[in-house]
Image (cartoon, rainbow, N blue to C red):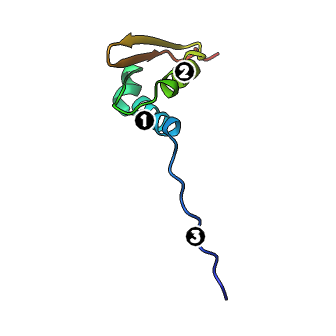
């Protein structure tokens, strides 16, 4: 019986890596309690990736983006339940 070779795991591209970093920051317990998260730019981050992800975040009605010298701070509210 022959076995197929395991598929090689592909490395996430720079945008996906940034997205994972943002997701970890937003989902951190302290961020969830305070409903805010600081997203810091790191060396090697693509300006295009930052622009794209912030545009996507800004599309959410319950999110405020505060610009900082070293990145941004996100604040969000939870929608009222009916």
Tell me the SS state at disc 3. Answer: loop
Residue 17 is situated, as x and y percent measured from the top left of the image, at 47, 39
- Which residue does the numbered mark 3 point to in the structure image? 6
Tell me the SS state at disc 1. Answer: helix
Residue 24 is situated, as x and y percent measured from the top left of the image, at 42, 36
- Which residue does the numbered mark 2 point to in the structure image? 57
Residue drawn 34% across the image and 30% down it = 42
Asked where in the image residue 3 lies, by quadrant, the reply is: bottom right
Task: For marks 2 and 1, give the CA distance.
Answer: 14 Å
Asked where in the image residue 25 lies, by quadrant, the reply is: top left
Viewport quadrant of the N terminus: bottom right
Q: Nearer the viewer, mark 3 or mark 2?
A: 3
Asked where in the image residue 32 lies, by quadrant, the reply is: top left
Tell me the SS state at disc 2. Answer: helix
Q: Is residue 64 left or right of residue 6?
A: left
Residue 22 is situated, as x and y percent measured from the top left of the image, at 45, 31
Residue drawn 58% across the image and 70% down it = 6
Asked if the residue under mark 3 is in contact with the one under mark 1, i.e. CB atoms within 8 Å, the reply is no
Task: For marks 1 and 3, give the CA distance.
Answer: 27 Å
Residue drawn 66% across the image and 85% down it = 2
Residue that sits furthest to the right in the current view: 1
Tell me which label, 2 or 1, sits earlier in the chain. Answer: 1
Residue that sits furthest to the bottom in the current view: 1
Specify few, some or many for label 1: CA neighbours under 10 Å numbering under 14, 14-19, or 20 or more. Answer: some
Tell me which label, 3 or 2, sits earlier in the chain. Answer: 3
Task: For marks 3 and 2, give the CA distance.
Answer: 36 Å
- Which residue does the numbered mark 1 point to in the structure image? 21
Specify few, some or many for label 3: CA neighbours under 10 Å numbering under 14, 14-19, or 20 or more. Answer: few
């Amino acid at each position: 019986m022959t076995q197929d070779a395991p598929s090689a795991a592909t490395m996430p591209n720079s945008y996906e890596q940034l997205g994972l970093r943002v997701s970890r920051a937003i989902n951190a317990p302290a961020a969830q309690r305070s409903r805010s998260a600081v997203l810091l730019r790191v060396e090697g981050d693509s300006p295009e990736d930052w622009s794209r992800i912030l545009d996507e975040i800004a599309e959410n009605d319950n999110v405020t983006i505060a610009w900082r010298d070293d990145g941004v701070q996100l604040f969000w509210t939870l929608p009222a339940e009916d």
